[in-house]
Amino acid sequence: MPLDLEVAVQNAAGMRVAREIGAARVELTQALSLGGLTPSRGTIELAREAGGEDGPEVHVLIRPRAGDFHYDRDEFAVMERDVRDALAAGAHGVVIGCQDANGELDRDGLARLRDAADGASVTLHRVIDTTPDPVAALRIALEIGLRRVLTSGGASRAADGLDVLRVLVREAAGDIEVMAGSGITAAHVAAIAGTGVDAVHFSAKRTVTVDGGVRLGSASDGVGGHEVTDLDAARSIVDALAMSHAV
């Protein structure tokens, strides 16, 4: 069966690209250059409108800050509210992740966020790739009732984590979805699909830069850059998958 496609987008324009290529879902976020942060309610509402009733589902990333995934009490309170607010704004599901001080998945924290979702679809994000044992993390996600995990197989790019992806697919045994993501392009999407994953996740992004010469923040990349979803890049991934299925 064809793989589900999920596109990481940051706005309504990205949603329109995802709809154009027939994606099943979008992961809606902001600040992809930081690994993604929780988008605003306005962004969620506009993306939902752009998708329409028959467009891709909207799954909202819940991440209050950049950096690690070991959160304090206030950050959990923010995430619980953001989960509820995202669903109230029309999202179909949420994407979450948290760790304890040892780097293992925070089972209790995940359960709190799952409960805040009140039955909506919940995806574990790539925190799984930063745990000591991704297979053990997959088991926890399954035990607490999450719908899917997004993983690169413990590597920086999914193309470099193929062996672990295969292990995760075997361990999941169809009881929880395994979605491969990180750095996916047309050049290696077929190999990633060949691991048996249920879905592939990609951003198909390009950077638009305007250098005004004045730094507005502390980021090392300076000023004037933002990322957009590129339709041609997204289509190239879809075409590469179609060709691999035709062979």
Image (cartoon, rainbow, N blue to C red):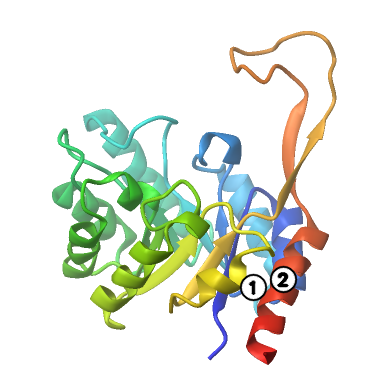
The residue furthest top is 214
Quarter holding the C terminus?
bottom right
Identify the residue shown where x is 53% and y is 91%. 1
> Is 245 drawn above or below residue 149 in the view shown?
below
Which residue position holds label 2? 19
- On the picture, is 73 further left or further right than 225? left
Quickly name the residue at label 1.
23
Tell me the quarter of the picture where residue 163 sits: bottom left
How crowded pointer 2 is (Cα within 10 Å; few <14, some 14-19, many 20+) is rated as many
Circle 1 packing at 10 Å, graded few (<14), some (14-19), many (20+), is: many
Q: Is residue 40 left or right of residue 176?
A: right
- Report the amino acid beneath label 2: Arg
243 shown above or below 146 = below
Q: Give the structural element (helix, strand or loop) at label 1.
A: loop
Residue 64 drawn at (x, y percent): 41, 35
Residues tagged 1 and 2 counted as in contact (Cβ below 8 A): yes
Left or right of 219 in this view: 233: right
Type of amino acid at the residue the image marks with label 1: Ala
Residue at 63% in and 62% down: 48
Q: Secondary structure at mark 2?
A: helix
